[in-house]
Amino acid sequence: MASEISYDLIVIGAGPGGYVAAIRAAQLGMKVACVEKDRALGGTCLNVGCIPSKALLESSELYAQAKDKLKDHGVQLSGLALDLKKCMERKDQVVAQLTGGVASLFKKNKIDHVLGQAQLNADRSVTVRQSKEETTLRAKHVILATGSRPIEIPGVAVDGKSVVDSTGALALSQVPKKLIVIGGGYIGLELGSVYLRWGSQVTVLEALDRIVPAMDLEVGKAFQRVLQKQGMQFQLSTKVKGAAVKKDGTVDVTVEDASGKAATLNADVVLVAVGRRPNTEGLGLDKAGVKVDERGRIAVDEKFRTSLPGVYAIGDVIAGPMLAHKAMEEGVAVAENLAGQAGHVNYDAIPSVVYTWPEVASVGLTEEQLKEKGVEYKAFKFPFLAVGKAIAMGEKEGWVKLLADKKTDRLLGAHILGARASDLIAELVLAIEFKASAEDVARTCHAHPTLSEGVKEAALGLGSGTIHA
């Protein structure tokens, strides 16, 4: 039985970009429907990505502190043991609370949650299929926000047990003795860190000659040294040619180094984390007349408009970093533009974070990008070793690195390796967003003692000079 309903806006996908776009549009007075194929709202991020991984990272870091660090604070423990089942249960509880929170926000803002698989039609209508039922939705505007999924490697079949993707790695029933991570990006390093802390021998295989290639090179090299000191092993410039699950459940991974020499590595579990690709299949984009690029991403203009009038796209399905907060900003921008406001996204002020311990956070340009652009710049690093709060915490690893225009002193990039870098970076995102100078940050009063004093000192280092080093 078919039916038809009309809206001001239909959002396809209830991940961070989609649900935020829906909420903002509803706040601005629009009648909104959000179509999601899964019963739980929140998309990959809340269900099998950002949130559950951070829950496990927190649990594993507390375990590592109890095992290795608390004795330095005079806390003596005995009988320490890991209850992996409890860790997983807590992770699931966190996910349930947040996905339920999105459902409550939909109810509060009178957004219709439509369950089913959506297909966009050339007349801008949306066909939603669930079981044997089919519903046609119509709206003045449609936002495509269907997110992304893990990239697969030829010859490496993910079975969810011995060979897993990021989703499978969030639900292992036991800690593997040996874990091979294919991919040296933030997903692999974060999940690798979880199991490293819990006792796994972790080896990261990366095809490039460096980890986290989008980061500032100096930061990436220092980051790798920190992880190696923790026990993580790396094989760079290494291509994975295939993986075979043996009768005993372990996995043989065939690799090839830069010289072409082949070797076989064995592990209990292999995690494939080589990136993500947009979820655009099954949406009917070809028939609807929505253009995509050579990488399967939906082509949009500066206002996020696709080639089909009235249809917009945001988040992982368009070009740019696949980050939840980037998708959220785009969702807000589209909703505000539709309401006649001036929504926009400043892509020079989008932070990126790796939630290992210590954390790594960046915003703006790297030294390599500044050199490529021919920009004359100045750089300064201030070590946490000279920050009182870091010393008191016993977290002296890392530094704050700032980059500024040599002539104007305007901040161009910020890169932090250290404890709570994910929180510290926000100040520098704000500075770049409002085109602040290094002196602006240096003359801002920072509470003492805090880790943020490292930011102030780094800014001072770009000008009159540091106080505490």
Image (cartoon, rainbow, N blue to C red):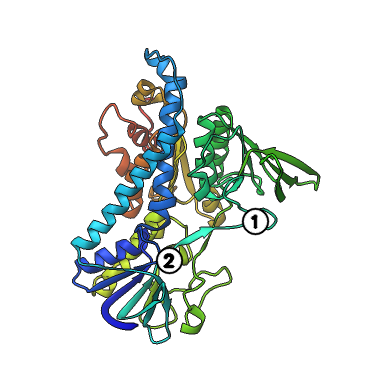
Amino acid type, mark 2: Thr
**Residue linked to disc 1:** 153
Whole-number angstrom distance, CA of label 2 to CA of label 1: 22 Å
Label 1: how many Cα within 10 Å (few below 14, some 14–19, many 20+):
some
The quadrant of the picture occupied by the N terminus is bottom left
Q: Judge by depth and name the residue closer to the eye, 161 or 293.
A: 161
Of helix, strand and loop, which one carries label 2?
loop
- 74 or 373: which is nearer to us? 74
Rendered location of residue 164, percent (x, y): 57, 48
In the depicted structure, whether residue 422 falls above or below residue 313 = above
Give the residue displayed 42% in from the left and 22% down from the top. 66
| Residue marked by disc 2 | 146
CB atoms of marks 2 and 1 within 8 Å: no
Q: Secondary structure at mark 1?
A: loop
Could you tell me which quadrant the C terminus lies in? top left
Rendered residue at 42%/39% (across/down): 88
Amino acid at the residue labelled 1: Ile
Q: In this rendering, is residue 246 above or below 435?
A: above
* Pick the front one: 275 or 104: 104
What residue appears at the point 51 percent right and 69 percent down from the top-left corner?
297
- In the image, taking residue 399 as reference, residue 181 lies left or right, namely right
Residue located 25% across and 31% down the image: 447
